[in-house]
Amino acid sequence: MGIDLGTKNTLVYIKDKGIVINEPSVVAVNTRTDQILAVGEEARLMVGKTPSHIVAIRPLMSGVISDFEVTERMLRHFIDRVHREVLSFLSRPRVVIGIPLGVTEVERKAVEDATLHAGAREVFLIEEPMAAAIGARLPIQDASGNMVVDMGGGTTEIAVISLGGIVSWRSLRVAGNELDQNIIQYAREHFNVLLGERTAEELKIKIGGVTDQVEQLEAPMRGRDLLTGLPKEVTIATGHLREAMQRSINLIIDNIKSTIEATPPELVADIYSRGIVLSGGGGLLRGFAQAIQSETHIPVHVVDDPLTAVVRGTGIVLDDLDNLRSVLLLSANEVSAPR
């Protein structure tokens, strides 16, 4: 079983079956009874709409576990569901799970423990940009440079990979969620409208764009008028969202340039000829690839189905564990074991 445990979505890959689960990483809990009411899409629809005794929790923040118990229960729910629907004969699966770059030993152990407690027999960890590169079928074990930018919900991971290892990298806590917050802030400052996170995300997906060259679209933006407290609808355009997201986009591009500057020149030459590979939700943001390309003067390619690149990578590792074992991280227990 391969799992992409993301801030926004959790995807599960099963050997010979493909991706069987793609659900939001949200859990709705009744605080009176400590009972889980919904997980995934059903829980996401409750965000911002629950009474006081029901909370819709996102148990991962910036790609790492912020609520251990809820994460474990969410994973258990997904693993149990896979057992019911697909793997009824296999009670405790072997799991490959993607984690962000630069997580601490404590955060790494939290992912392992939550997965083991949720019913896994064995847990292997892989860094998300490495998994995305494998999912994009890049020749990661060759002596040549491959650059991956994986922009998810909580983190943007930038990595240069050669000989099955990461040579230079950056991990930013600026990604899809931060862009949603930028839109909320912009609506507040320029239109006096208070938006919810779901509305901001829907606007970003529907009309969001990063450069002037993308098609200029318009959409109604509905929220609460901060002056009267009553509902308000305003028409907002792609240009507004570009302005709202500009600072965060520039920060990501600056870090891509810094990663290239820290890369050995031989690998930079490879990247220049092969291009940068863009995966994650950021790959779907209109004009983002072109913005990176115009700033770095390096071709940028968006992987096929960028949202599933990481989980497809975990699936390829599962299918060829003997040859790809070297790209996996040591478990937290192996790291802390005395030499």
Image: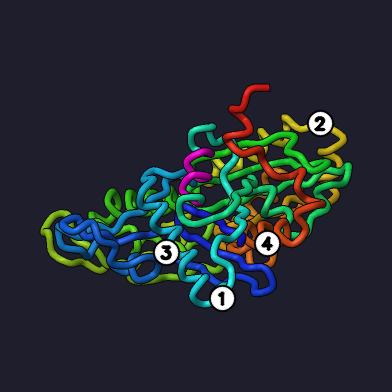
Cα gap from disc 2 to disc 3, whole angstroms = 45 Å
* Span of residues in magenta: 108-115
In the image, residue 175 lies in the stretch drawn in magenta: no
- Residue bearing the label numbered 2: 264
Give the label on residue 86, or none. Answer: 1
Task: Give the foreground label among 4 and 2.
Answer: 4
User: Are the residues flagged by discs 4 and 1 in contact, CB closer than 8 Å?
Assistant: no
Q: Disc 3 and disc 1: Cα gap in Å?
A: 14 Å
Residue at horizontal 51 percent and vertical 68 percent from the top: 22
Which sits earlier in the primary sequence, circle 4 or circle 3? 3
Q: Which mark is residue 77?
A: 3
Asked if marks 2 and 3 touch (Cβ < 8 Å), the reply is no
Identified at 39% across, 69% down, the residue is: 41
From the image, state whether disc 2 or disc 1 is nearer to you. Answer: 1
Q: Is residue 143 left or right of residue 244?
A: right
Name the N-terminal-most of marks 4 and 1: 1
Query: Of marks 3 and 1, which one's residue comes earlier in the chain?
Result: 3
- In this picture, residue 91 sits left or right of residue 168: left
Ranked by sequence position, the earlier of labels 4 and 2 is: 2
Q: Does the CB distance between marks 2 and 1 fall below 8 Å?
A: no
Q: Is residue 109 magenta?
A: yes
Horizontal and vertical percent for residue 193? 24, 57
